[in-house]
Image (tube, rainbow, N blue to C red):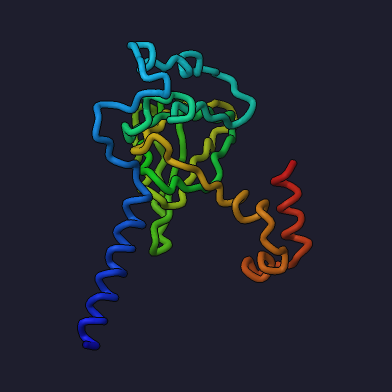
Amino acid sequence: MAIRSSVLLLSLALVLAISRTTQANDPDILTDFITPDTGSVNASYFTYSGLSAFFNPNPKNFTVIKASMTEFPALNGQSVSYAVLQFPPAGVNPPHTHPRAAELLIVLFGTLEVGFVDTKNVLFNQTLHEGDMFVFPKGLVHFQYNRNHNQSVIAISAFGSANAGLLSVPKTVFTTGIDDNVLAKSFNTDVPTVQKIELGLKS
């Protein structure tokens, strides 16, 4: 009886683990595509022009122009999306994660330093040149940095999800209301230092 109960509990735990894993991915659809509430579509529904004017040789700030399910509803159920990343000189895309997708980045213009940290805390760091590609595995913390102080960078990222999600590490940690004492102890610093970081991220 005890063995049967243990097997039942183990089976239940396995089912829960599998269901949680599958929830982190885009669902498989049973049709060619998902139609909008209106029910009728033509070729325009599958066309998106939001990236047509992305090229800005002199961006003032780091900017992202997305083509995800939110901007382009035809991507719903297709497990793919794009983003154009524009870096000013010395611009950075701070450490962040995409919980629902891997990211495949290609540099179109300039030179870009990229990297991610795996679950063993090993940093994989690389400098990319025009035409180089780099993959950021799903869910791992990663960053991009334009080390050049004179030239901007343009890159395009493809994601294996129509809605990859984004968790910015600095903002998630320092601007979501976690107690300053918890943060001070976690980062082995003091509360005034934590508050200074928080203030900088809110401005």
Q: Can residue 113 be seen in this view?
A: yes
Quarter residue 135 falls in: top left
In which quadrant is the C terminus drawn?
top right
Quarter residue 188 falls in: bottom right
**Which residue is at 58% across, 35% downward?**
91
Q: Can residue 153 be seen in this view?
A: no
Nearer-the-camera pick, 203 or 189: 203
- Percent position of residue 62, x then y: 58, 32
Nearer-the-camera pick, 38 or 53: 38
Horizontal side, residue 64 vs residue 17: left or right: right
Horizontal side, residue 56 vs residue 142: left or right: right
From this viewpoint, which residue is outermost toward the bottom?
Answer: 2
**Which residue is at 61% across, 56% downward?**
173
Residue 2, placed above or below residue 97: below
Residue 1, placed above or below residue 76: below
In which quadrant is the N terminus drawn?
bottom left
- Percent position of residue 108, x then y: 41, 24
Residue 28, placed above or below residue 21: above
Horizontal side, residue 30 vs residue 166: left or right: left
**Which residue is at 67% across, 60% downward?**
178
Quarter residue 151 falls in: top right
Nearer-the-camera pick, 169 or 190: 169
Residue 185, placed above or below residue 131: below
- Percent position of residue 48, x then y: 42, 17
**Which residue is at 43% across, 62% downward?**
121
- Percent position of residue 96, x then y: 51, 47
From this viewpoint, which residue is outermost toward the right?
Answer: 192
